[in-house]
Image (cartoon, rainbow, N blue to C red):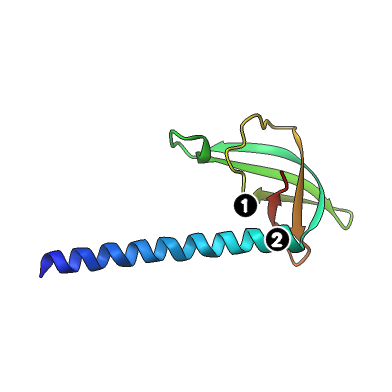
Amino acid sequence: MTDLKLNLSAILIILFIIAVAAYVFCKIHYTKKNGIETDATITAIEDEGLSTDASYNYYVRYIMNGQEVEAKLSNPGFGKGLEVGTQIRIKYLPEKPKIVVWVK
């Protein structure tokens, strides 16, 4: 009985992770397809303390309707070669300016 509970818990955790990943993928895809493209500057790079290149958070600053917006990249990928001050192309949604995706 305990093995069954452990297996069920593992399956539920895996399903939750898949659902979260699908949600993030859809959000990124929608923003890439429907977002407004503009230039942005990388303002900060934070290390999450993991030992992989994917463990960095990248923050950018861009102008939307004459206002500066600071946002975290939703899809930094591995970001090799990106440094603070680097100019990149992003897309954003006017109704959600803090959700930005890197247009590679």
Residue 18 position in % (x across, y down): 44, 62
Residue 77 position in % (x across, y down): 59, 43
Amino acid type at mark 2: Thr
Quadrant containing the C terminus in the rendered view: top right
How many residues crowd around disc 2 within 10 Å: few (fewer than 14), some, or many (20 or more)? many
Q: Residue furthest right?
A: 66
Q: Residue at x 66, y 44 (%)?
A: 59
Q: Is residue 13 above or below residue 74?
A: below
| Residue underneath mark 2 | 31
Q: Residue at x 75, y 49 (%)?
A: 90
Q: Give the Cα separation between the discs numbered 2 and 1.
A: 10 Å
How many residues crowd around disc 1 within 10 Å: few (fewer than 14), some, or many (20 or more)? some
Q: State the image quarter where residue 16 is shown.
A: bottom left
N-terminal label among 2 and 1: 2
Q: Nearer the viewer, residue 70 or 21?
A: 21
Q: Is residue 104 above or below residue 6?
A: above
Amino acid type at mark 1: Ser
| Residue underneath mark 1 | 74
Q: Secondary structure at mark 2?
A: helix
Left or right of 26? Residue 93 is right
Q: Nearer the viewer, residue 14 or 97?
A: 14
Q: Secondary structure at mark 1?
A: loop
Q: Is residue 6 above or below residue 69?
A: below
